[in-house]
Amino acid sequence: MNIFVCVKQVPDTETKIIPTSDGSFIETASIKWIMNPYDEFAVEQALLVKQTNPAANVTVVRVGSTKDTEALRTAMAMGADDAILVDAADNLDSYSIAKALKGAIDKSGKKPDLILTGKQAIDDDALQVPQILAEMLKLPSVAVVVGFELSGTAVKAKREVEGGAIEVYELSTPCVIAANKGLNTPRYASLPGIMKAKKKPLAQHSLADVGVSDADRRVKYSGFRLPPEKPAGKKFDATDATKQREVVAQVVGLLRTEAKVI
Amino acid sequence: MANVLVFTEVHDGHVKPVTLEILGKLAGQTADVAVIGDLSAEQVSLLAKNGAQNVHKLKGANLDKYSPEGYANALSEFIKGKNYDYVFGGATSMGKDLLPRLATKFDAGLASDVVNFTFDGGSFAGTRPLFAGKCLAKVELTGPKPHFVSIRPNALGMTANPTAGSGTASDVNANAGDIRAAIKEMIKATSTKVDLTEANIIVTGGRAMKNAENFKILNELADVIGATVGASRAAVDSGFAPHAMQVGQTGKTVAPTLYIACGVSGAIQHLAGMRTSKVIVAINSDPDAPIFTRADYGIVGDLFQVVPVLTEEFKKLLGK
């Protein structure tokens, strides 16, 4: 059984984003890169499947800059067997990334039974790659998955939609599953795991190797800029219990007369 | 002038409000609407009032429930052979799942979660937040047409006096094709409130809520003002609320008219997820909490004392 987990490396959530002076992208030099948080749930799910299917092979695939391989080493330290890295700019669009992932999976020579991804990457927040990849591979997919059961080739996947409602899907492998927070609790990499990961195979390809060129770009970004800062608002002191009602009534009044939102 | 198809979702017989936001903003272009299933004459005239020309109702077997493959197959078959330059939809749960798959059937690009756009000589140029709203960028599409765009609900706003369209409704025979991933069961949400991503008013609780039970005071406030209740990552990770309620970079990005943050400190990843709220009220006992730098109205005080008073004052104001 071949399981592929697609991961992305993204700036840590506490990172302050600074656009480059020409607005073509963001300053990446001082960023701390982490594995996209949603991808951790995908890696964990692959490892849970491997626990009950010891013959399964878990390959992590990433398309992005080769200057830091943190996300792939983390996934292998958690227990993935091997990794594929496709060297690409950090601002590639979703269509190109999905095509590169497909190219890398095809090139591995392993027929995928299960492809796991995070539901979105928290850098470009495009929420496109799992669905594009599924369509390119002509596979069914379920996204925003908070529950997953595999028995033989039968899959039951719970998809979270608006307001926390759940759609329960039944399908068969091979398929693409995009994980949401809540699917499982990702394990931490153990020290022996980290040591072992250093010796696990990491294949590297160029975009050209996996059949992707500039002509595959579909979405162009430019003019990166910070959002306009709001001027400081009004602050009221309601620490004195005897003044609370007066202060709150004043704010409620302003919400109607000044802000006009209620 | 661009020829645009707007895909609309229908919820309880009503088109989603984001459809009307899109139609209003498309003034000057030719806009048709496609819906899967039936739509009442009243809803068709609402679409017409907001600018819809033709309203295509796609009907066929196995389209009574959403499935990524069934909807994508039906819509792609309908769109093929038409001369649409663009296909728009809402960046809703369904839109986010469906549109990338649909676009790929045309080897086409999708600009997702767009918050504003213009058409210059028939060419789309949009603005969208990246890094959870920590920065903005211009987004343009290239490659095979039609080009696809998803619009974040509540971002464009309703157009005050939209230019009406003819609103000519017709039925289209649609084919869902081969559906391999189908919904077998729906588990209803415990809340009947509108989703955070589409809510007009949001009341959010942070770590200072201390436990899940205390969210009761936020629910009481929310009931009075018709709000949806959210939670910060700290509150979700502490087990006070489910992840479906999380606002922020690893939760939901929201853009309500009014956002009331109760006991939320204002971590950078939380601010990123709610910064485009029109008016922000913050209640926090720490006068130096970062949330106050973003708040239009900050109330320094104990939320357990302030929130119930706030609920009472809103009741008075609204005559409840």
Image (cartoon, coloured by chain):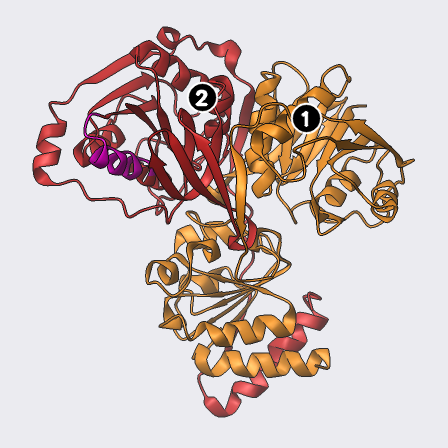
User: Helix, strand, or loop for circle 2?
Assistant: helix
For the residue marked with disc 2, what is the amino acid?
Ala
Q: Quadrant of residue B239?
A: bottom left
Q: Quadrant of the C terminus of chain B?
A: bottom right
How packed is label 2: few (under 14 Cα within 10 Å), some, or many (20 or more)? many
B76 lies left or right of A28 = right
Q: Find disc 1 in the rendering and name its residue.
A: B74
Q: Is residue A14 above or below residue A34?
A: below
Toward the right, the furthest residue is: B166
Using the rendered image, report if marks 2 and 1 lie on a common chain: no
Q: Quadrant of the N terminus of chain B?
A: top right
Range covered by the magenta-colored residues:
A42-55
Q: Find disc 2 in the rendering and name its residue.
A: A98
For the residue marked with disc 1, what is the amino acid?
Ala
Residue drawn at (43%, 75%) of the image = B214
Residue drawn at (51%, 13%) of the image = A216
Q: What is the count of numbered marks? A: 2
- Chain rendered orange: B
- Chain rendered red: A
Residue A132: percent from the left, percent from the top?
50, 24
